Image (cartoon, helix red, strand yellow):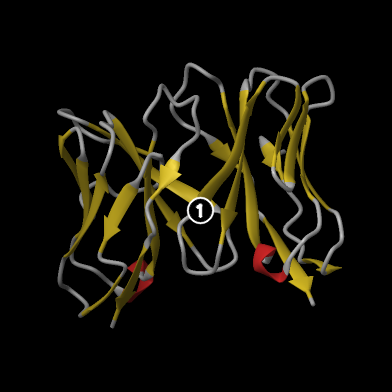
Amino acid sequence: GAVVSQHPSWVICKSGTSVKIECRSLDFQATTMFWYRQFPKQSLMLMATSNEGSKATYEQGVEKDKFLINHASLTLSTLTVTSAHPEDSSFYICSASPGLGNYGYTFGSGTRLTVV
Amino acid sequence: QKEVEQDPGPLSVPEGAIVSLNCTYSNSAFQYFMWYRQYSRKGPELLMYTYSSGNKEDGRFTAQVDKSSKYISLFIRDSQPSDSATYLCAMNLGGSYIPTFGRGTSLIVHP
């Protein structure tokens, strides 16, 4: 089945530094990937839609300069949290679909970011 | 009103019980419906997806869609403690890539 790999699974960084999270589709090509943020006991909050070869589409209220998304190939999208602050601490999850969105979305295992 | 409503629970049941998880939605244009299971500190795992109205069965899981009522359900038979997780419903418009998620229902199956 479709597999999405996300790394790292957890990361601790100092305030003011940047952190990069990778999302790879291992056995299918994904022209579109999605990045979500999830707070404890809350549902998934869509941050942005990552499109291969073009700029990401950000949801309202998401700072594009803070959350840099690069989708350089059909199997890799990256999310970089720049100048991280403690309020950026959260669970970040990517997802992709091997079909036209109608076959269900496969999620990565998530990245727990803690900014100290 | 949110597009997708889902009771957050928690729903606590004894082992072996039949579990019913539900979502309602307001957008009648939704065509594809999905259920995900999410264990703590893990990404959601796709359990089932269905198209339009009807039932779909996979092992102990049955997904049901009633488009006339804008209501979807996931039934879990012979529930096990390992089924304890958060279950999220999701749906999309078919031609759109972006799914809309419910907030998830926390299920606890106790031995």
Is B31 located above or below residue B2 in the figure? Answer: above
Could you tell me which residue is drawn at 43 percent across and 26 percent down?
Answer: B97
Q: Which residue is mark 1?
A: B44
Q: Residue B48 at x, y = what percent?
A: 61, 38
Q: Quadrant of residue A19?
A: bottom left
Mark 1, residues whose alpha carbon is within 10 Å: few (<14), some, or many (≥20)?
many
Could you tell me which residue is drawn at 64 percent across and 28 percent down?
Answer: B50
In-front residue for pair A92/B34 = B34
Is B15 located above or below residue B88 in the figure? Answer: below
Left or right, A50 with reference to B49: left
Which quadrant does the C terminus of chain B fall into?
A: bottom right
Could you tell me which residue is drawn at 48 percent across and 16 percent down?
Answer: B95
Is B20 located above or below residue A89 in the figure? Answer: above
Instruction: Residue lying at the far front in this picture: please name it.
Output: B59
Letter of the chain that mark 1 sits on in the rendering:
B
Q: Quadrant of residue B91?
A: top right
In this rendering, does residue A65 appear at all?
yes
Left or right, B100 with reference to A13: right
In-front residue for pair A115/A64 = A115
Left or right, B41 with reference to B70: left
Left or right, B8 with reference to B30: right
Q: Residue B106 at x, y = what percent?
A: 70, 63
Q: Residue B73 at x, y = what percent?
A: 77, 40
